[in-house]
Image (spheres, rainbow, N blue to C red):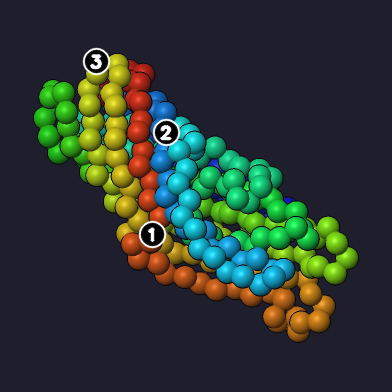
Amino acid sequence: MELKRIRTNLLTILFVCAAFCAFGQQGQSFKLYQNTDIFQLYCISLHPREETKQVKVNFSRISLAFVFHSRKRSFHEVELQIPEFSKPIEKLDFPLEYIIFKGESFDQTANSFSFRYEFGKLLGDKSKPINFLLSTGINPYYVQLEYVPNIPNDFYRLTTYYGFALNATPRLYFKLNRRFNIDLNLPIRIYSFQKATYRIDNPILPVRQQRLMETNHLFLESVYTLRLGLMWHLSSGH
């Protein structure tokens, strides 16, 4: 039920953003992004107890975006991450700093939902083949990590991360022709607000220690994404 509620709320916000962006715009474009993500995993092995840190580099994440162009050299972009359902935790694509448990005594699955809204401005002459743009945006997300024990003496665990990141994104546009552009950009996480909840169903622990929550305010988080986008102009009035 919680996953369904979070997914419904994110979709509602997304459709409101899209409807707002579409009103009074001059042209629309569709964009396909290839994302190169770099982020950190803090791995905790339970048997024996050991903590390690590793850097994950991922080239496989694909996302889709819709761009709405205005007459004042500005644009709105709504990017959709493809949702992830019941994936092995170590194969999770959404870029975030994670604390994960490792071991053979439980099965691990993960879910993630996210999108990004950006508002940007063209800083050069749009008739030139190469242009520099700058955008700012917000990136709400929800991630769930679930550990289901497969032996009697272990315990169910659940970790959730939800919040949003505020981004500044420098961009380079390479004009191929009237219909297609290449967009190379790097979203920089200026600030992130995050709630993290931790659950462990260990009856030996007091109830207050079985359910923990923390609030994090993160600045210039060490999570990086390089996006290479192919943009197709659906109308020529951009």
The location of residue 27, given as percent across then percent down, is: 31, 24
Q: Nearer the viewer, residue 84 or 76?
A: 84
The location of residue 54, given as percent across then percent down, is: 49, 58
- State the quadrant of the C terminus: top left
Q: Nearer the viewer, residue 233 or 224?
A: 224
Q: Nearer the viewer, residue 4 or 180?
A: 180
Instruction: Identify whether 233 is placed above or below 184.
Output: above
Neighbours of disc 2 within 10 Å: few (<14), some (14-19), many (20+):
some
The location of residue 70, given as percent across then percent down, is: 26, 32
Q: Secondary structure at mark 1?
A: loop
Asked if the residues shown at circle 2 and circle 3 are in contact, with their CB atoms under 8 angstroms apart, the answer is no
Asked if the residues shown at circle 1 and circle 3 are in contact, with their CB atoms under 8 angstroms apart, the answer is no
Distance of label 2 from label 3 (alpha carbons): 20 Å
Work out whether mark 1 precedes mark 3 in sequence or the reverse, and give the earlier one: 3
Identify the mark at residue 34; answer none if there is no mark.
Answer: 2
Whether residue 205 sits left or right of residue 145 in the image: it is right
